[in-house]
Image (cartoon, helix red, strand yellow):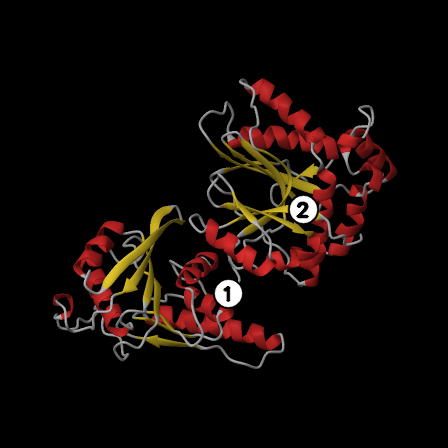
């Protein structure tokens, strides 16, 4: 297949709340415009296919898909029976050809990257999946899949269905191709539906099942929930409908972490927080509660002219961070790079940091929510002490802090106690594992530490 630089629309899921941050990265690195979806957590990129490889390298994006067709105001029928017939009709009318070409090109990109054999995806509680059991096995060699995909090739004059006479439908063309390619093992697929809205007469499972049946009948593919070759996405948000083909099997956020902890932060969320800081050359950036090191690791891979210092009071967490750094170093060395990383990891007391006063440019961390780690009760004492110590080590007047927490009431109370040292710039509301959390962007006031009532307390030691 020739890699034509055709214009396509790529959809991407991003951490909710960081849609505009992701759009900024797209503009910066691809010189392309990204549209933020009405449905939170999604953006759409209009690019040419020669930039598809670069899309995979963006740090803000979780999962990618190529858009087959999108409808801004889809008119759903009022009964399940009518909707089912509507899905069947829609499957035959969609312009599948170009999207399947992009899907094939994406497979060749993944092959060149030497991706490992995919694992079975987990089933989301919010997704409906259409599937039937199949005893056929998926070819382990992508070249075998490549042969199977020849049945999807369509002649150039058949690309635009709307430009053909009514009696020359895409369904008839497809049937002719299938007849010519008889004997070729059909591809396996599944349909995943993500639905939001309360004015639908159907569920996600209903839509996935009915639309999946229509796709199966149209392409003569075999349905398989786990060992599928093609994942068809049906995204419904009120009256907005987007049909797409998945380009990622595993989320792109799993790029830097090999040793996970109980509350490991997604790399995409960590990157979004770092972009809020706008790190500069020679900045000293500290994560005082680093856990497995997701934030500093993401930072050193993107901002290599800054210096990152990570620490935690938990020895196990520090060990995980060290192992993750070793994993990154091995990967970079395998690619031919001999340089190290501008990053150190320390075990310390986060309320009594072994650092000089006024020496840090940026503090960025994922604070304990009081759910899986710590407790809400302990946060009432911990948060004020943390903010006080962060103010001590940060440079007055210029330093920033970007802090993630779900314990909003406790944090805002602690911040009010430290109002002489910190000013809240703005808040980004995000979804972290189903929890509604806030990323608070703070600015250090010009007040010198030790001259206000907020910092007359004696240093505390974090015993928990």
What is the quadrant of residue 362 in the picture?
bottom left
Query: Residue 155 placed where, x, y %?
Result: 84, 41
**On the picture, is 114 further left or further right than 289?**
right
| Residue highlighted by disc 2 | 8
In terms of secondary structure, where does tag 1 sit?
Answer: loop
Query: Residue 408 placed where, x, y %?
Result: 27, 51
Q: Quadrant of the C terminus?
A: bottom left
What is the quadrant of residue 446 in the picture?
bottom left
The Cα–Cα distance between marks 2 and 1, rounded to whole angstroms, is 29 Å
Q: Nearer the viewer, residue 426 or 54?
A: 426
Q: Residues within 10 Å of mark 1 (few under 14, many from 20)?
A: some
Q: Nearer the viewer, residue 451 or 215?
A: 451
Q: Residues within 10 Å of mark 2 (few under 14, many from 20)?
A: some
| Residue highlighted by disc 1 | 256
Q: Residue at x 70, y 38 (%)?
A: 222
Sequence-wise, the earlier of marks 2 and 1 is: 2
What is the quadrant of residue 369 in the picture?
bottom left
Q: How many marks?
A: 2
**On the picture, is 50 further left or further right than 400?**
right
Image vertical order of residue 345 relative to residue 3, above or below: below
Q: Residue at x 77, y 36 (%)?
A: 160
Image vertical order of residue 69 relative to residue 49, above or below: above
Residue 138 at least partly seen: no
**Cβ atoms under marks 2 and 1 closer than 8 Å:** no
Residue 216 at least partly seen: yes
Q: Nearer the viewer, residue 31 or 376?
A: 31
Query: Residue 17 placed where, x, y %?
Result: 42, 49
Query: Residue 255 placed where, x, y %?
Result: 53, 62
Image vertical order of residue 178 relative to residue 372, above or below: above
């Amino acid at each position: 297949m020739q890699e034509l630089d055709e214009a396509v629309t790529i959809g991407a899921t991003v951490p909710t709340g960081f849609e505009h941050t992701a759009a900024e990265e797209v503009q910066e690195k691809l010189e392309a415009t990204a549209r933020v979806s009405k449905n939170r957590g999604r953006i759409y990129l209009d690019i040419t296919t020669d930039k598809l490889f670069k899309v995979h390298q963006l740090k803000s994006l979780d999962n990618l898909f190529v858009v087959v067709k999108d409808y801004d105001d889809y008119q759903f029928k009022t009964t399940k029976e009518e909707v089912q017939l509507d899905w069947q009709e829609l499957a035959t009318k969609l312009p599948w050809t170009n999207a399947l070409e992009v899907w094939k090109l994406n497979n060749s990109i993944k092959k060149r990257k030497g991706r490992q054999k995919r694992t079975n995806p987990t089933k989301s509680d919010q997704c409906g999946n259409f599937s039937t059991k199949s005893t056929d096995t998926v070819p382990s060699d992508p070249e075998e899949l490549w042969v199977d995909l020849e049945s999807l090739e369509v002649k150039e004059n058949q690309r635009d269905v709307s430009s053909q006479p009514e009696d020359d439908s895409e369904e008839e063309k497809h049937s002719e191709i299938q007849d010519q390619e008889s004997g070729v093992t059909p591809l396996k697929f599944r349909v995943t539906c993500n639905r939001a809205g309360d004015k639908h007469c159907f569920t996600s499972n209903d839509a996935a099942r009915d639309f999946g049946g229509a796709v199966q009948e149209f392409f003569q593919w075999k349905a398989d929930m786990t060992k599928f070759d093609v994942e068809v996405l049906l995204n419904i948000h009120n009256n907005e409908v987007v049909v797409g083909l998945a380009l990622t099997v595993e989320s792109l956020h799993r790029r830097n972490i090999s040793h996970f902890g109980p509350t490991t932060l997604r790399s995409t969320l960590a990157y979004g927080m770092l972009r809020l800081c706008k790190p500069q050359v020679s900045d000293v950036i500290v994560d005082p509660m680093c856990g497995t090191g997701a934030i500093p690791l993401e930072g050193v891979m993107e901002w290599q002219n800054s210096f990152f210092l990570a620490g935690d009071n938990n020895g196990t967490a520090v060990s995980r961070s060290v192992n993750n750094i070793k994993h990154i170093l091995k990967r970079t060395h395998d690619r031919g790079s001999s340089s190290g990383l501008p990053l150190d990891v320390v075990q310390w007391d986060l309320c009594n940091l072994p650092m000089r006063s006024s020496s840090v440019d940026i503090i960025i961390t994922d604070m304990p929510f009081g759910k899986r780690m710590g407790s809400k009760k302990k946060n009432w004492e911990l948060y004020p002490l943390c903010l006080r110590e962060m103010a001590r080590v940060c440079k007055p007047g210029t330093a920033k802090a970007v802090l993630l927490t779900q314990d909003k009431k406790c944090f805002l109370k602690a911040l009010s106690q430290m109002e002489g040292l910190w000013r809240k710039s703005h808040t980004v509301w995000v979804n972290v594992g189903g929890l509604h959390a806030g990323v608070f962007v703070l600015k250090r006031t010009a007040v010198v530490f030790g001259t206000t009532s907020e910092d007359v307390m004696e240093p505390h030691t974090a015993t928990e």
